Amino acid sequence: MKALTFKRGIFPPHGKHYTENKPIEVLMPAGDLVYPMIQHIGASCEPLVKKGDRVLVGQKIGEAKAFVSAPIHSTVSGIVKEVGPLLHPNGKKVVSVVVENDGQYEEDPSIGRPNDYKKMSREAILEKIKEAGIVGMGGAGFPTFIKLSPPIEKKIDTILLNGAECEPYLTSDHRVMLEETERVVEGLRIILHLFPGAKGYIAIEDNKKDAIAKMKEATKDDENIEVAILKTKYPQGSEKQLIYACTKREVPSGKLPADVGCIVQNIDTVVAIHRAIVRGRPLMRRIVTVTGGAIQNPKNFKVRIGTTYRELIEAAGGFKEDPVKIISGGPMMGTPLFSLDIPIIKTSSAILCLTKEETELSAERACIRCGKCVDVCPMNLLPLSLNFHSLHEEWDAFEKENGLDCMECGSCSYICPAKRHLLQSIRTGKQTVLMNKKK
Ligand code: SF4
Ligand code: SF4
């Protein structure tokens, strides 16, 4: 069968060979755990603990006071050392709770109560997902219970599990699909239970043949689940492109997947849903790929949220050469890091440490109007023109040319022979237009 795909896109080198065949290792934290009170899109949480308090594994330490927010739980037992502003992976200082791990892993009595989702109401399932603090773990961090509660008039008939993992170097979702297959499938069944009559797809790029085989075997008796084989192409895993590849539906400008009857969920998010419902455990861990040419022994780790990036790098053997660039996430959409003394949060998927050979550091040159950026843009935008408008502060023109539709995939910057900083300028343009709108 021909692999499904979307229009345009690019084919960057994978870099997945470092870790794709490495089984996930459990890493127990050695140092203090740091929990920023914002690990999601939406309002910050309010700390529920103070210095000197003892906390337990799974205890809620950050309360979501707004609708768009998600509570935060301690992932170890120990004493609260500090509550105050500390460096966040986003580069800013945010209020955080620091817990000194006592190594006892004593659990809060409120967690660990199993449930049978088939006997639960829709409301009860959504409440559990909300209270478990689950957010989109593919990077966006949008609270999952909201995504699973679309307005009643939007009829959802398709649930897509995003197993594309199209970002180069990242292999955590791949390993989860191989090693936690049944949890992924059962998590999808829970979501399908919320939307009776809907069809589920587990969408996987064709460079992960072992995961495709495992998922096909695990779902062979599920009439409402299909494994969709996707062409290996970037950004295949972005929501709109995934929806188009699997259903041929186009999400219009300014609209959401629910407007075309779809909900997209990340692989690790679905495992978190399974854990919250079936095992009664809040979101406390995530799988992180530690990789790149500068890392001694690249690996995938199952790690407690709150563990520092530095600990993960040490657990991967440290650096074999000085990295030229360290990125949280993948090379296309990740965020450059300037400190390793920051915690793994709910949306941390990878630590990428690149060597000089793996990094392109050429200077920006004048546009030669080759049109390559236009050819690859999956959102059908004119990156060269948006770049011009942003640099000349022509915000009306920027908006008129649908600059806000840019999903910041970086394909235009990647392909540009003049090494124009297209993505950076378009990102600035988006931020400015949105700020002006707020004013
Ligand atoms: S790819 Fe670069 S050089 Fe070519 S048109 Fe776009 S901005 Fe100009
Ligand atoms: S303009 Fe935006 S969406 Fe289009 S290729 Fe560039 S970064 Fe991606």
Image (cartoon, helix red, strand yellow):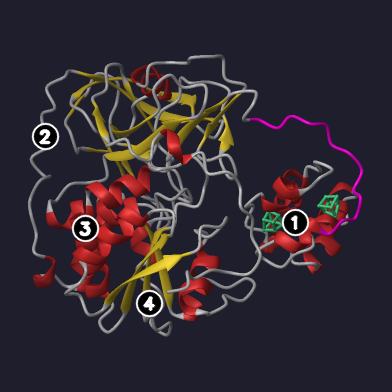
- Which numbered disc flags the more N-terminal residue, 2 or 4? 2
Amino acid type shown at disc 3: Lys
- Which numbered disc flags the more N-terminal residue, 3 or 4? 3
Q: Secondary structure at mark 2?
A: loop
Q: Quadrant of residue 56?
A: top left
Residue under label 4, please give it.
158
Residue under label 2, please give it.
107
Q: CA distance from mark 3 to mark 4?
A: 22 Å
Amino acid type shown at disc 2: Glu
Q: Are marks 4 and 1 in contact (CB under 8 Å)?
A: no
Q: Are marks 1 and 3 in contact (CB under 8 Å)?
A: no
User: How busy is the neighbourhood of tag 2: few (under 14 within 10 Å), some, or many (20 plus)?
Assistant: some
In what quadrant of the picture does the N terminus appear?
bottom left
Amino acid type shown at disc 1: Val
Q: Are marks 1 and 2 in contact (CB under 8 Å)?
A: no
What residue is shown at x 44% (from left), y 54% (from top)? 207
Magenta segment includes 370: yes
Magenta segment includes 186: no
Residue 169, x across and y down, in percent: 49, 39
Q: Quadrant of residue 117?
A: bottom left
